[in-house]
């Protein structure tokens, strides 16, 4: 259909960290006509939706921000070591204002479907407002953890109290004062929310399915001298995090946990425990993710901490993780999480020992044959991670085929940024890219820069479409799986393994490359340098 009208060069879906920068980059660097659609009423993405008590980023604030606005890196002062949800939202609002981005964003509008028109080589994009627009490029900036997992608990409709999911928390907040509150789940979100809710509620009942290894966050004010030194060294920091394994300034101990004396090991672990944050997870002994025995000694350290902190030995036992290797589920960072279970108003109901949740009743939750009466239930039950937000777009690629059809046994992507059969579609921090196993802004910026260069290159060389070949894609999928199969990650029922959602095909969702974020960046750059090796350009 030569000469078909094209409304936009690119449609970007989502106005979180990735959508904001994608718009900035395509519009202000390449001069493209771009439209961003966002379901929320403003920018923010994850930080717009997740407003539960205690919501905070687990990466240090000095690296949880954009690095493309060098002046802003110098100007912006984060108030604490880890940025709190309202502060990150303020930051993203500020960026959007500062770069005049909102004029190309349409809020309160959800993309409900999009199909690639093989005659015009354009995407037709539909919204819940009934609009359809066309664009050459479609960019999913939908986030990895944006599709809520609300398990279909029997009887929920009968509950007479109020209930909320943490990722759809009311903007006005929730007053828990004098209330009997139930929290379902003990993942990273619940670990942040539980101590906060316990301070307000009359009674808090925590429903745990799997106990979690937690490490103290040790949040607080950053020493002004350190903050100053970091600002002076931002070029160095940016280079280091881009070349690092996890997009953080954390490096493995280049030794086996088993080759050192117990004394040396305890000292190293103490250092990381005392420092707080992701160091314990991401800067531990290098064989911790590969060797069960090495993992066991590190896990044992954390189990001892739980037993020391939790006063009631029976409760401590329930809170002690079992049956999976440390670090193979997302590391929650806590502030008084285990201490909270020493409070008189907090009760732990453990699925394995007390019995699982059977149903929601008019008055509360029945678990293990006992009814717990509640005024409010908070579901901290997580997300249909990574593939969920993309499937929810109802995309149709070549031949009208959907992602559900392509991804019967889990995701198939090339580099986590593109999908065979879906020309000119780019997925920022998509499945099988480092994404959730990295400090997100680092991976987001890498993808946005790569996509921008790719589109610029296509325009210069007069190409209309780009899509990965099925062969290159299958090689990538094989590589992703080969690497993860060498680790202990596959043994856990984690959301990384798609195991949190019944019926979701068991597959590892992110990419854990042999050299992490730095190696992955090199690979993507090589692909581009070789004329987009593995892609077909027409
Ligand atoms: P997570 O980490 O997926 O945690 C969800 C929690 O909810 C976890 O404890 C689950 O137990 C529990 N859960 C899920 N479904 C059920 C059902 N059906 N019954 C009982 N309990 C259930 O989500 P979060 O929001 O905490 O964190 C997600 C990410 O956001 C986090 O990793 C950061 O990257 C930011 P399970 O462990 O699956 O047995």
Image (tube, grey):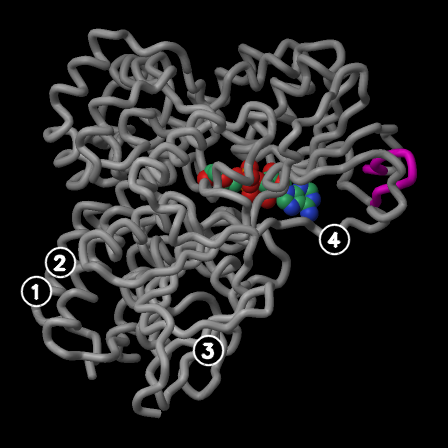
Q: CA distance from mark 2 to mark 1?
A: 6 Å
Give the extent of the magenta segment: 359-368
Which type of secondary structure does the marked residue at label 4 adopt? loop
Q: Label 2 near label 4: C-beta < 8 Å?
A: no
Left or right: residue 144 compared with residue 23: right
Task: Describe residue 378's horizontal placement relative to residue 253 as left or right.
Answer: right
Residue 191, how many percent across, how many down? 56, 27
Is tag 1's residue or tag 4's residue first in the polypeptide sequence?
A: 4
CB-based contact (under 8 Å), mark 2 and mark 1? yes
Asked if residue 147 is among those painted magenta in the image, a careful observer would answer no
Q: Earlier in the sequence, mark 4 or mark 3?
A: 3
Q: Earlier in the sequence, mark 4 or mark 2?
A: 4
360 inside magenta stretch? yes
In three-dimensional space, the C-alpha distance between marks 4 and 3, rounded to whole angstroms, equals 30 Å
Q: Callout 4: few (<14), some (14-19), or many (20+) C-alpha neighbours within 10 Å?
A: few
In this rendering, does residue 131 appear at all?
yes
Is the residue at mark 1 in contact range of ligand 1, meaning its CB lies under 8 Å from it?
Answer: no
Q: Is residue 230 left or right of residue 152?
A: left
Q: Which residue is mark 4?
A: 152
* Mark drawn on residue 115: 3
Q: Residue at x 36, y 10 (%)?
A: 221
Is 85 situated left or right of 263 in this image? right
Kindly identify which residue carries mark 1: 529
């Amino acid at each position: 259909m030569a000469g078909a009208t094209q409304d936009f060069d690119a449609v970007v879906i989502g106005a979180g960290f990735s959508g904001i920068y994608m718009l900035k980059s395509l519009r202000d660097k390449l001069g493209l006509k771009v439209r961003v659609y966002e379901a929320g009423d403003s920018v923010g993405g994850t930080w717009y939706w997740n407003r539960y008590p205690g919501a905070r980023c687990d990466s240090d604030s000095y690296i949880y921000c954009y690095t493309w606005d060098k002046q802003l890196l110098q100007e912006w002062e984060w108030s604490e070591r880890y940025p709190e949800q309202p502060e990150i939202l303020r930051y993203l609002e500020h960026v959007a204002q500062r770069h005049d981005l909102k004029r190309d964003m349409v809020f309160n509008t959800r993309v409900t479907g999009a199909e690639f028109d093989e005659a015009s080589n354009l995407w037709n994009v539909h919204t819940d407002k009934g609009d359809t627009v066309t664009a050459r490029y479609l960019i999913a900036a939908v986030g990895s953890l944006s599709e809520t997992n609300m398990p279909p608990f029997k009887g929920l409709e009968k509950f007479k109290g109020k209930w909320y999911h943490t990722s759809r928390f009311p903007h006005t907040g929730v007053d828990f004062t004098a209330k009997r509150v139930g929290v379902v789940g003990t993942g990273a979100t619940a670990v942040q929310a539980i101590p906060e809710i316990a301070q307000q509620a009359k009674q808090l009942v925590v429903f745990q399915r799997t106990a979690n290894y937690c490490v103290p966050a040790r949040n607080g004010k950053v020493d002004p001298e350190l903050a100053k030194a970091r600002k002076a060294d931002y070029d160095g920091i940016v280079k280091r995090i881009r070349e690092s394994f996890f997009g953080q300034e954390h490096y493995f101990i280049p030794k086996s946990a088993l080759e050192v004396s117990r004394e040396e090991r305890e000292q190293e672990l103490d250092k990381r425990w005392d420092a707080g944050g992701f160091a314990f997870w991401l800067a531990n002994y290098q064989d911790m993710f590969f060797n069960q025995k090495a993992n066991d000694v590190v896990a044992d350290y954390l189990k001892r901490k739980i037993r020391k902190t939790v006063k009631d030995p029976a409760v401590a036992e329930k809170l002690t993780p079992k049956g999976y290797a440390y670090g193979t589920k997302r590391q929650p960072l806590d502030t008084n999480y285990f201490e909270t279970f020493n409070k008189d108003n907090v009760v732990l109901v453990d699925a394995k020992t007390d019995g699982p949740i059977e149903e929601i009743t008019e008055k509360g939750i029945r678990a293990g044959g006992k009814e717990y009466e509640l005024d409010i239930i908070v579901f901290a039950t997580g997300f249909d991670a990574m593939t969920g937000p993309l499937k929810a777009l109802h995309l149709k690629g070549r031949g009208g085929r959907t992602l559900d059809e392509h991804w019967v046994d889990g995701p198939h992507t090339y580099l986590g940024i593109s999908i065979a059969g879906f020309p000119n579609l780019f997925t920022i921090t998509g499945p099988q890219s480092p994404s959730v196993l990295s400090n997100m802004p680092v991976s987001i910026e890498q993808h946005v820069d790569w996509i921008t260069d790719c589109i610029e290159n296509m325009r210069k060389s007069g190409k209309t479409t780009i899509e990965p070949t099925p062969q290159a894609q299958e090689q990538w999928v094989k590589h992703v799986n080969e690497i993860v199969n060498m680790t202990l990650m596959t043994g856990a029922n984690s959301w990384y393994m798609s195991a949190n959602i019944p019926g979701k095909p068991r597959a590892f969702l992110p990419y854990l490359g042999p050299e992490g974020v730095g190696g992955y960046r090199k690979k993507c750059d090589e692909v581009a340098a070789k004329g987009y090796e593995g892609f077909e350009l027409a």
